[in-house]
Image (cartoon, rainbow, N blue to C red):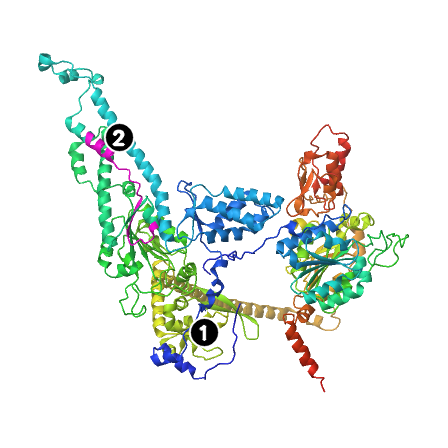
Amino acid sequence: MFGLKGDWSLEVKDRYFTLEDYCGAEPRWCTGCGDHGILAAVHRVCRDSQVKPEKTVAVSGIGCSSRLPHYMKTYGFHGLHGRALPVACGIKSRRPDLDIWVATGDGDCFSIGAAHWVHAMRYNMDLTMLVFDNGIYGLTKKQTSPTTPVDVPTNTHPSGSLLPPLNPLTVTLGVTNVSFVAQIVDWNAQIRHQVIQMAHEHKGTGFVRIIQRCPVYVEAIGKTLQEEPARMQLLTHEKGVQVDDSVKKLFPNHAEHDPTDLAAALTIAADTSVLPLGILYRNPDAPRYDDISAAGLEMSAAERLAGMNQALDHFAI
Amino acid sequence: MSTVTDRSPEVGADYIDTLRRFHYGEPAAAQATRRPEGAVLPALLNPYRDAATIRYRYPLYLAPYDAPDEAPLATPLAQHLAQSIATFAPGDDEARILKDNLPWLERHLRNALTAPDPVAAPASFEAAAAALEEHLDLGQSNRDTLRSDLESLRAAIAEGSEFLGYGPDAPLHLLLHAIRRHGLPRREALRKRIADSKRVLESLLKVEAARSGPAASGAAAERLDASLLSSMLDKRAHGSVAMSAARRARIEQALGVLQAWDDDPVLVRFIGKVTNPWFGREDTVDVIDSTDPCAAAGETFERDALRFAGLFAALRTAALEKEDSYDPAVHDSWFAGFDWQSFSADELRHVTPVVAIVSADHLAGDGLPSFSRLLGSRRPVHIVSWIRAYDNPAVQPGEGPFDAYRFELAYFGVGHRQAIVAQTSAASHDDMLAGFECALDSNRTSLHLINRGTQTKSEQPILDPWFVASAAVESRAHPLLLVNPDAGDYAAERVSFAGNPQADKDWPVESLEYEDPDGERKEMSLAFTFADYALLMPALHEHFRMVPKGYESDDLVPVANYLDSDSEAAERLVPFVWAIDEDGSLVRLAVSRALIFACRDRLNYWHTLQELAGVHNFYVEEAVERVLEDARAAAEAEREELLKAHAEELDSARSAAAGEAMGQLVDVLMGADLSSMIGDSAPATMPAAETTDAVADDEPVVDEAEAEPEPEPEPEDEELSFDEPWLDTAACTTCDDCISINKMMFAYNADKQAILKDPRAGTYAELVEAAETCPAKCIHPGKPLDPNEPGLDELMARAAPFN
């Protein structure tokens, strides 16, 4: 009406945050490590969405990836090995107003933290969960992780990993009430930024597996994919990733995939002949446990005591 | 998002009777029903409740008077800032902090415009820029970037430009701005013409004074006729002839006028009630109070025109004298009657514009005779009047605004045929300025009927004035109209209907999203009628009554549907408008018959204007329908004809075929060997088909030399290569590789993506190494910048895949 165009809103924020406001300590990851790019994407997404740094928490477990909270000028929790998700869920259940990022790795999440991973996906609390998957335990200097490809020699398997790697996508998609599953590679800035942004905007647990280069211990994993882009399949859709032609050109193998189709997502995830990139599944209507756990948070101590007494009165004789 | 919150009606099913009686004006029913309370808004206007959070066309950036002609007089501030930023930071990632905070800057500038008058834009912008820097409190690096971008933006705020906020005097400020923009160059041109003419006349007198005296004097002069002697000379050698006394007197008189011309700084005279003292303080504005501004404006123009008549006569005399073509027999009498009606179009535009500022009540009341006389006078005087769109200017004391058909001043103006009529809204500055400029470029009387959304008789409207004024246009309460008789004699040439929303419809129709009691999102289409606009005026709330939440009746219909229904059905119906109360609940308000009467009146006027502007022209539509009907009938007749001809041909073909077939059958039967129909009658078999392989084997071998050449492979995308090194920043993954090779050569931008800071800050070897290491392959080393660097052949070979 009134000939007002789409940009008619003049809402202004009290405060404005630049990248600097989210940048913490100088990263100490190795030169060429894919983690640098993921961190930059997290900073940019925070800046673009203008989340308040004091209302943001970065939670991690143990591993190279888990150094991320140190590099964020926000609240952070560098936790125990495999326990990033329980801590993040705990924070969210008591402080649903906080914006929570979870940084974990293939060892931290898919191995020692596997139980938490599965249940956190089902609880579907509003978190942005980034799994830095380099296919190796890097911090402890090259041990086989659940996603180390077959035949890649490591310090624990010098003649090469023996078993086929775990497929985190099929596992995650198989969890009841999962709501957002995506996969990206760290070296494509446009897709990386777009997917992490969508995971952040998603209400629920935004699971993003990031194939990340470790140039020190398993350089070949990333290098092979970079040199043979046909081994990846870019999934695009109006409800998923949308890229311009310059990016599409980098991926000779691309397909349209509707991320609301769980069965199709499972089929794509199970096909290990190509590495799917993009949003595999997205369901914004899945119930969230933080909606339930937040009930009564606004009550005062006296109100809670009264409620408890009322409940206990049922058992009075 | 508004909601329908209540399902359970608080009244009985027969409540419709009470509402119906209210609709028909029964006082008891009005008492028994509830008026809308608080800030109830028409449902479609609810999103605009908080004007502070909405960007609309004001404040305006007013370009300086000496700006290039193509520069618009006024541009919405947001548009000017965005366009200016795009000139120095076209990319999304450039000037990011400034772009992100542009709404803050814009809002700060808007809030700083507390007075209703324009302010100097450069100073205002600098203060806002400083406030933004302080508000953001950035680190040094970001602060420097922002400051640099703000300085670039400051350069787009020209010296002499102004910001103008929305207020009751915005139209007069814009009119003055347009007059200055048009008037100052004209005034300068006139000044130059006066100076040139003075020089010409002074030269003529100087030459005359310097002329040598008579060749003979005394007794010789009595016997010697110098003129006669001159006439005997060759024609090319005329002697000098003294200026006649009459000519000298004429030149001296004209020079006297030019020398005495008072270069008055006044560019416009405002006549009438101008309450804002700002205009009185301006030396370019002459404010004259008057109880009958139209009459006073005519007289003032006459006075000014008389003064200018002397000037233009002197200027014209100077031009004639310069060419020595003044012919007293012709020109003396012509100059004797020289008044403004003899002025050229250009001369008329030099006369100081006179603007009568009159209330609509006065124009439609006591001032009507002088108003009408002025409109018909041919004097290029401008009339500006403020229109209350909900009211009737001809209403008498004690009458309601809907007691009579509305006196439409614009139509009254159009009735005078030769005046420019511009019915505009202050909310739509470009339409309003178009009306002003049309009048200033013309030499006709002009009438500007402006709605500002600010003027009411009693209580103020609920919404911000800009939105009230805009709603008046949307609801057909104040349609936009520009009639320019200079454009031609026909309405099609004269009338512009631009700016009216959905001009082909009776009422604009918009969609409204709401939530039903079950929390489900729904959408409905709503017409924005005059009744919706009337709801903005608390003084008119007497014409509305709340329909209890949850109350349902088939007899309740939206106003637009009610107006479309036939009179018999309308008798039992009760019209209503959708509204939203302060709690965000969607409610219905029954409407009085008096207001419906006004809706019909406005709709009728709207239809009249539509027809005038060529929208839904009855004659055109009828002619089109007639032509279509004729075309359809002709097509149908042709079709019938063709079908008939086809059927006849078919019959004839059938009979011919039947006859022929019968003849052939007879021939066959008469001459046939019937024995072949008995016994071994199996048809001879066809030879067996050869195998595919055999065919393949027998395929002729085509000599390779004769074979068609293989199609050329599709050329791959053209490989581009560059001599200069470059970095595709958008593709950078922020891996730190290049930065760790040379921090002087590579750096991060504001998005923490690499840029090629200085390719000369390191060696070509480093550039090539960075390109090889880069995981995104976004570094392109180009050719070496230093031809003396060792090992270039090898480095260039390594660089080749990345260029």
Q: Write down the residue under mark 2.
A: B198
Where residue A121 is drawn, which disc sits there?
A: none
| Dots 1 and 2 on the same chain | yes
Residues A193 and A143: in front is A143
Label 1 sits on what residue type? Arg
Percent coordinates x, y for residue A4 in the rendering = 48, 57
Percent coordinates x, y for residue B694 in the rendering = 81, 55
Region in magenta: B252-277
How many numbered marks appear? Answer: 2
Q: Chain of mark 1?
A: B
* A9 relative position to B27: left or right: right
Residues B437 and A31: in front is A31
* B70 relative position to A48: left or right: left
Percent coordinates x, y for residue B766 in the rendering = 74, 36
B275 magenta-colored: yes
Q: Are marks 1 and 2 in contact (CB under 8 Å)?
A: no
Q: Secondary structure at mark 1?
A: strand
Q: Write down the residue under mark 1.
A: B588
Residues B641 and A123: in front is A123
Percent coordinates x, y for residue B655 in the rendering = 52, 69
Q: Chain of mark 2?
A: B
Task: State which tag comes first along the sequence, 1 or 2.
Answer: 2
